[in-house]
Image (cartoon, rainbow, N blue to C red):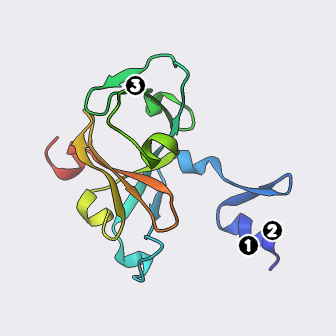
Amino acid sequence: MNAENRSTRRGFLRAGGAVTVASALAGSAVYRVRAAEDNTSSLERPTMEFDHIGIVTTEKKEDETYVTATKVWVTNFRDHPYHVEWLRFDPDSPVTGPVREMPHVAYRVKSIAQAAEGLKVLLEPFDAGMAVVGFYQTGDGAVVEFMEYPEDNGSG
């Protein structure tokens, strides 16, 4: 099997010589992921469902909402066709480092503590309104957000 066929079978599409993730990521597919430095099999890790991607911007966006805890303006990723959340930080936001400087991928989880095992803590879990969220960095430098929604834990 050639590389192009293998990529297509894994849910990737070859476009103009580059491999891009299929738009199915914005859907409700469930992905099992594990930290790069973790030696356990992916089947032993908690299930994580793709929620959104967060991109930092300095431009004001339509329908922003203010998150007081982190002093950041965010858009509603549920209103975006590809589940993009735009983040615009106030100059005096307490958020620094990778969360403020890099994009992140967010996953819906039942337990932030379990999902974050072995990852570097960037922002301890806090109540963001619709969910409790925490930000972490993987062994290879990616920023991930784990989200616990009340309805997923029997309290909503």
**Amino acid found under the numbered disc labelled 1:** Arg
Any mark on residue 6, and which? 1
Q: Residue tagged by mark 3? A: 90
Pinpoint residue 101: horizontal percent, then vertical percent.
50, 42
- Using the numbered discs, state the Cα–Cα distance from disc 2 to disc 3 in whole angstroms: 44 Å
The reply to whether residue 139 is in sight is yes
Q: Are marks 2 and 3 in contact (CB under 8 Å)?
A: no
Q: Is residue 111 something one can see in this rendering?
A: no
Q: CA distance from mark 1 to mark 3?
A: 44 Å
**Closer to us: 10 or 64:** 64
* First reached walking from the N terminus: tag 2 or tag 3: 2
Q: Determine the image quadrant of residue 150.
A: top left
Residue 120, percent from left and from top: 36, 62
Q: Amino acid at mark 3?
A: Asp
Question: Residue 125: x and y, percent?
Answer: 24, 48
Residue at image location 54% in from the left, 30% down from the top: 57
User: Disc 2 marks which residue?
Assistant: 4
Disc 2 marks a residue whose amino acid type is: Glu
Q: Which of label 1 and label 3 is nearer to you?
A: 3
Picture quadrant where residue 17 is located: bottom right
Q: How many marks?
A: 3
Mark 1 vs 3: CB contact within 8 A: no
N-term mark: 1 or 3: 1
Q: CA distance from mark 2 to mark 1?
A: 6 Å
